[in-house]
Amino acid sequence: MSNVSRPVRIGTLVVLGYCSLLQLLPQANLLNYYYAFAVALCLPLTVAIVIARDTAPEDSTLQLPRAAAITLWLALLPLIPVGVSALFVANCAPSLGFMHYLLGPVVGSIVALGVGLSARQLMPKGPTKVVLIFWISLIFANIYWFYTRPPIYAFNIFIGYLNGAIYDPVVRVSAAWSEFRAVSVMVGLGYIFSSRLSPKYPRQGKTAIMLLTLASIGLTSRYQLTASRIENKLGGRLETDHFILIFDRQAHPLDAIDDIALDHEYRFEQLVSEMGVTPIEKITSFIYSSATQKQELMGAGRTYIAKPWSKTIHLNRIGVGALVLKHELVHVFGADINTGWLGIPTRAGVFPRMALVEGFAVSHEGARGRLSIHQWSAAMREIGIAPPITDLLSERGFLSAGSSKAYTLTGSFILFLRTTYGQEAVNRLYATGDFLTTFNTSLTALVHQWQSFLRDRHAVPLSDADLAQAQFRFDAPSRFFRVCALEIGQWEQQARTALNRKEFNTAIELMERIYAFDPSLDKRLQLMNALLQAHQLVAALDHAQALAMNETAGSVIRTRALQAIADIDWLKGRTTDAHTAYLQLLNMPLSLSARRRIAVSAYATENRQGSYLGDRLRSYLFDTHQTPQSATDSAQSLANDFPQDSVVQYLLARRYVQSDDELRGIQAHLRALELKLPSPLLIRETHLQLAHAYRRQGEYDEAAAQYIQAKALFSSRGYLDNINDWIARCGWLKRRMPSL
């Protein structure tokens, strides 16, 4: 113990204590990206300070070996607490976690070793100050680039890589990340060499150390892409009255981007009317071809991002009418209400008040699916899965509740305040964050008013089917409390890609691996669906029957399992059993697309349908190896053989629309209506698809008429609100026609 200096003992206690505390945090109690990043916040800084303050051996040849041994000792310590946790916490991909550990804390410790030795040479009497100034300078450089440039990620030679998007389910080790850490190692070795040079050549050694320091800070800029570099990589640019669209030219044809640009302008005018503010500067909208491209260029993959202070939003490839565009624009409009340096409500000017930021955006967004946000919120409260709104108003409560719950409930609360007290009052709340001053009423009283409103079944109607859908949609833990959230998120993405490529065996292997670590009902449902797509009917039936008989499963999961059983019956030739099951499923709590599929299946399995038509429809519906073109060819062949069948015309119309053959799609839809479709589900969907097709063709009066006919066949508030938005859009487009 005589050779263990006081700085080493203190450093050991700091690292062990800090890493032990991390074991109390979800997702930081196993070897993964989160743990590696959390350790990197502390370990390299501790290593640098310990090396700088350690008593150097008199023999200069022993200084570096001793410092390296201390660094290795401290770098291994974090593996002890997480290793103990591994006895109790499942780790789905320890090798991936170890790679994150190498790229983060280990590389950071190599840099810290060099920085600590160099600090000792630069200021022998105050090396700790040198280390802290260097560490703080790097942090401030990261903050500066985050504030002034599009990316939300950060590269730091001590810490490694900060992903930035807390809701993204996948963190990829990109080529830029690997390259940066390789450069970081070289910088660390440069510091070590310079520190060895300083005793013999003080001026040259100190000059080298200062140059390396400038290079270290410069590296944060080199890997933090500027807006112009991102624009060059995407290649497309279009300016409108209020926007600058930067888009991937390869992925977005010009006619498609024109429609997206119009969608931006429509949402802009909507928000000017709703919010009472008009941004002066043009808003820059970056539109990427995929989540992968977006994550590589600016840090967020599946998460959509706005930077209100810089008037920028970042979107994946979206279609016209996507609500996420309006959501992100609300954040930007909000910067004209809250004039702080971030343009959002904060605590202490730094920490975002997520409930106000996201609740404000969701309140303007519109309905989410079949229900309004008030209905979803009321349903969550009624089935007992809604956290208290007062908890959500704290940052910890908001993040721990799960994004879907937190966004919906806070959106409902803010929308209630807008409706009750007016937009101007809510704008003042967004500017100040003070409920009492804004509404002259306590937060407790406001929450009570909102809860009373949600309990009013005349104002907020709910059915048993609504409650079932809410349970299926929201009854899941926050991703921070899920098993192996990042690893399973990556496997799920790989499985989806494999399914899209018809690589069913690969997809099933991945989903079986997921289910082995997370044997939850929804993961079993996903595995069942993959097996069914692969026509592995025996295995699919086993899972479907188990889910259908599971009393703890919600009615949505049991109903989907029953649908799979009906599909398997039909595929095995038990047509009568399948038909009976399909009829029973038509009124079950399923999505519109699932119910439309069931309606077609029920029609095809009717006794009065000729077995030849039924067999042809079965082949068409269950051919999972079809390409888009072969599917269209199959639908055309069906229509040639059964020209008087309304359902066949309906299926053909959908194929034409999906193939961008609008005119033939319109003709086939009209023909399907003329031949009398057998199901109200198919009739209203046909009117809706006709409306979309007419709108895309610029026939706005015809489109509005079809939207109105479709609206008359819907009863759910969410769908009605959505159709009303399409009708308003047609009116806006018609008024814009002279200027287009």
Image (spheres, rainbow, N blue to C red):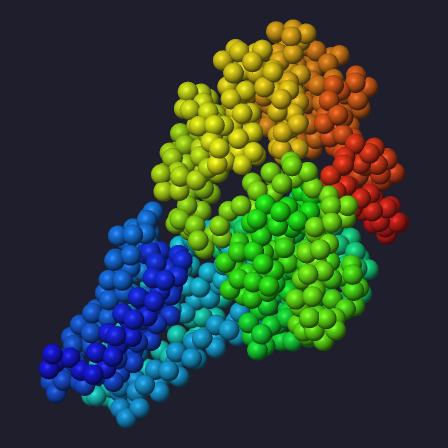
Using residue 671 as the reference point, say whether residue 298 is left or right of it.
Answer: left
The residue nearer to you, when weighing 376 against 327, is 376
- Compared across the picture, whether 446 is left or right of 499 comes to right
Q: Position of residue 215 (x, y in %)?
A: 40, 75
Image quarter in which the N terminus is found:
bottom left
Residue 483 appears in the figure: yes
Of 706 and 569, nearer the camera is 569
Q: Residue at x 48, y 36 (%)?
A: 552
Q: Kindly tell me whether residue 306 is visible in this rendering.
A: no
352 up-or-down from 252: above or below: below
**For residue 192, which quarter of the picture?**
bottom left
Residue 67 found in image quarter: bottom left
With respect to residue 624, does 302 lie above or below? below
Would you place residue 539 above or below residue 51 in this image?
above
Badge count? 0
**Image side of residue 85 versus residue 220, left or right:** left
Q: Nearer the viewer, residue 325 or 369?
A: 369
The residue at the point 44 percent across, 64 percent down is 162
Q: Position of residue 271 (x, y in %)?
A: 77, 59
Q: Residue at x 70, y 19 (%)?
A: 647
Q: In the rendered view, does 140 fall on the left or right side of 633?
A: left
Q: Which percent across, then down, holds residue 283?
A: 70, 63
Q: Position of residue 263 (x, y in %)?
A: 74, 50
- At 77% from the left and 41% from the top, the residue drawn is 720
Which residue occupies the extreme bottom position in the image? Answer: 125
